[in-house]
Amino acid sequence: VLRAASRSQGTLRVRLRSGMGQRLSRIRDVATIYALWALLLGSLIWWGFLALLGLGMAVSVAFMTPYPRTVLTLFGLAAVTYKLSQRVRRQRREARFWLALAAVGDRSPDAAAAVQALLLEPDPTADMLLLAAAEAAWTGRYADALDAVERARPWAASLGIGSGGLKLRFPGLPGVVSFDEGSSREVALDTVRAHLLVRSGRAAEVLAEQPRIPDVPLSPLMLVVVGDAWMFTGHFREAARAYGDAAAACPPGTPEESEIRFRLAEAQEKTEQLLQEAESLVDIGDDSEADALAEVGS
Amino acid sequence: MTNTYRTAPARPEEKAVQLSPIANLDTLFPRPHPLASTVRLLGVLALATGPLAGVPAILLWRIVEREAATSNGRITGAPRLFVRLGWAGTVVGALLMLVLCCLRLLQGV
C-alpha cells in the first residue's frame, strides 16, 4: 500500500508541474469534496448512499494496492457471500414459518415446538405472532395467545401480507377471522383480542372498551364476542340483543348463523329462567330479590 | 321476545374440535420450499463457478429435502435437476482446478 501510495504521489507531482495539470487536479479535488459531501448528506435520507461511499472508498483502496484485481475479486466474493447468506437466512426463516403454519394447521404434536422456535426469532413478524396466538388458543393457553396478539398489534396493518392472506379459526369463535386483502386487519385483530380477553375471564374489559367506538357498526363476529362478554358477566338480556344483531348480520343458512342462533337461544333461555325465578319470588313475597333478578333478566 | 331456541340446531361443538385452526390451509399449501429458488440459482451458477456455487447448492438442497420430508407433503422440495447441475459444476470445477495445478507444477519443474 505504501509503495503504491508513493508511486501515485510521484505521478501527481509530475502532473502538478504543468499549469493545466494543477487546474485539473484542483477541479478534481473540489469535485471529490462535493461528491463526498453529497453522499454524506444523502446517507441521512437513504443509507444506500453511505454504502456507495464505502464501496467507492474500498475500490480506491483496492487500486492503491499492488494487486488491485485480487483485492477487488475478494471484495466481490465477500459481498456476494454476504448477500447470499442474507438471502438464505431470510428464506430459512420463511421456511420455518411455513412449516409451523402447516404443523398448526394439521394440529400436529410438533406444532407447539415449531411455534416456540418462531417466537425465539430475534424479531418475529406479525404473522408469526398471529400463528402463535392461534396455536396457544387451541391449546387453551389464552393468556399466551393474548400476549402474542398484543405483540402483533403495532403491525396489525401488515398481518397476513407475508403469507398471502391468513384465515384463522379460534376456539369458541363461530366463524373465520380473515387477515387478507379484502378485510380490515385491524378490526380482525381487535375481534381476536376481545375474544381472547373474554376467554381469559376478562370480559369486563371488552365491555368497557365498547363504548369508545359507538358509531362504528360492529362486525357479526365482534357482536358475538360482545354477546359472550355480556353472558360471562351475567347480563343475559344484553347478550341476547348482541347475539340477535349478530345473527341478523350473518348470511342465513351458514354454520356461523346456526351457532349464533344457538347462543341467542341460550341467552334467551337464561333470561326466561331469571324472569320465572323473579315471578316465583314475587309470589312468595320477597320483592327485593325479585327486583334484582328481574333487572338482570328483562 | 320470541324464542328462537326451538328452531336453532344443536351446537356443533364436537365438530369444531376437529376443525383446523387455519381455515385456508388447502389454498396455502402445497407450496415450494422458500430455499428452492436459491438452490435453482446456485445450481445454474455452479456451471460457471464450479464448487463455489455448487457446494452451497448441494448443502441447501439437503436442507430443503429434509424439511420437505417433515412437512407431510405441505412443502415441496427443489427440483433434482439443479442439485445435479450443482454436482456436475463442482466435480468439473474441482477437476479443472486439479489439472491447472498439475500443469502449473509441471511448468515450474
Image (tube, coloured by chain):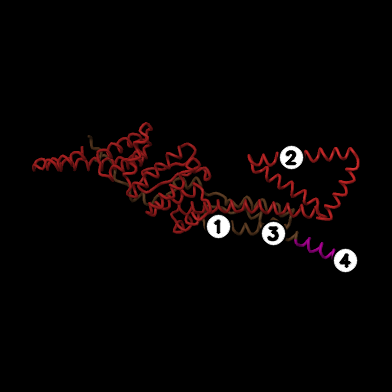
Chain colours: A red, B brown
State left or right for residue A62 relative to residue A118: right
Quarter occupied by the N terminus of chain B: top left
Q: What residue is disc 2 on?
A: A35
Q: Which of label 1 and label 4 is nearer to you?
A: 4
The residue that appears at 77% across and 41% down in the rendered structure is A32
Circles 2 and 1 on the same chain: no
Q: Residues within 10 Å of mark 2 (few under 14, many from 20)?
A: few
Closer to the chain start, of discs 4 and 3, is 3
Position of residue B79 measured from the top left corner of the image (x, y, whole percent): 62, 53
Position of residue A270 measured from the top left corner of the image (x, y, whole percent): 22, 43
Q: Indicate the amino acid at tag 4.
A: Gly
Circles 4 and 2 on the same chain: no
Foreground of the two, A262 or A29:
A29
Q: CA distance from mark 3 to mark 1?
A: 21 Å
Report helix, strand or loop for mark 4: helix
- Which corner quadrant of the image does residue A3 belong to? bottom right
Task: Give the vertical position of A124 relative to A243 (above or below).
Answer: below
Q: Residues within 10 Å of mark 4 (few under 14, many from 20)?
A: few
Residue at the farthest top position = A215
Circles 3 and 1 on the same chain: yes
Q: What residue is disc 3 on?
A: B87
Closer to the chain start, of discs 1 and 4, is 1
* Tag shown at residue B67: 1
